[in-house]
Image: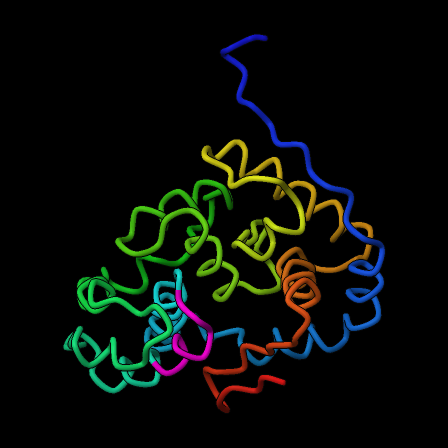
Amino acid sequence: MDLMQPYLFECYELDPGGLEYAIGHSAEYINYASHIEPDRSDTSQVWERIAFAILTANCQFKSSVAGLQYARTCKGRVQGHVLTRVGGGMTQAKAGWLNSLPPMLELLKQARETWTDYRRRLARVRGLGITKASFAACLLYPFEADICCLDVWMLRGLVESVPRRLTQYEHIEERVRAYARECDMPLFLMQWALWDWLRGSVTSHDIFTRGIDER
């Protein structure tokens, strides 16, 4: 084996039901995405997407939503002991990460920046990392992002073990990108549909404008 070559994961063949679900519900996910796409000139809307990506790391979805609802009332002054009252795996450290976020316009994708480079830059923000940097980018650019969030649910459906290198993550991501091309869907919407299908429940993420719609 050439040790200079990164080890690439073998991906499972996705159950055909996943693609059938994505194709059959594509209009719904386009609608969901249209509701979360922010006005990126509005720093408050950018902040909410970045903050939510941080809050969702190793935390239950509803607790992350509750955390965002609290944090938006006291930007820059989030208290850890209050934040953790939402439960679901929320940690006090996230309060410090939210309070120390850099200026929001610095966290937008630059014109000549590739999606991979943008993700690497976002991943340097405390509390993000590669997976949640991908999620933040997708929340900010739901129709355009050419990267996706491979969390534990996605990985369970695609590979046997957690990727340890960015090259491995990108290899798995390319499989999802191929599914997106096959279904003629934006990459994030494809990932989102598969995430819901793998979990067996639908979450619209419409939490930034009209409250949570989860069923």
Residue at 66% across / 55% down in the picture? 187
How many marks the image carries: the answer is 0
Residue 19 is drawn in which quadrant? bottom right
Q: Is residue 198 left or right of residue 133?
A: right
Q: Is residue 64 magenta?
A: yes
Residue at 46% across / 74% down in the picture? 61
Looking at the rendered image, the quarter that the N terminus falls into is: top right
Q: Main secondary structure of the magenta part?
A: helix
Position of residue 101 relative to residue 35, above or below, is above
Q: Position of residue 107 (x, y in %)?
A: 34, 58
Q: Is residue 126 left or right of residue 213?
A: left
Q: Position of residue 38 (x, y in %)?
A: 48, 74
Residue at 56% across / 23% down in the picture? 7
Q: Residue furthest bottom?
A: 210
Q: Is residue 12 magenta?
A: no
Q: Position of residue 119 (x, y in %)?
A: 44, 47
Q: Position of residue 164 (x, y in %)?
A: 45, 35
Give the magenta range.
59-66
Residue 145 is drawn in which quadrant? bottom right
71 vs 146, nearest the viewer: 71
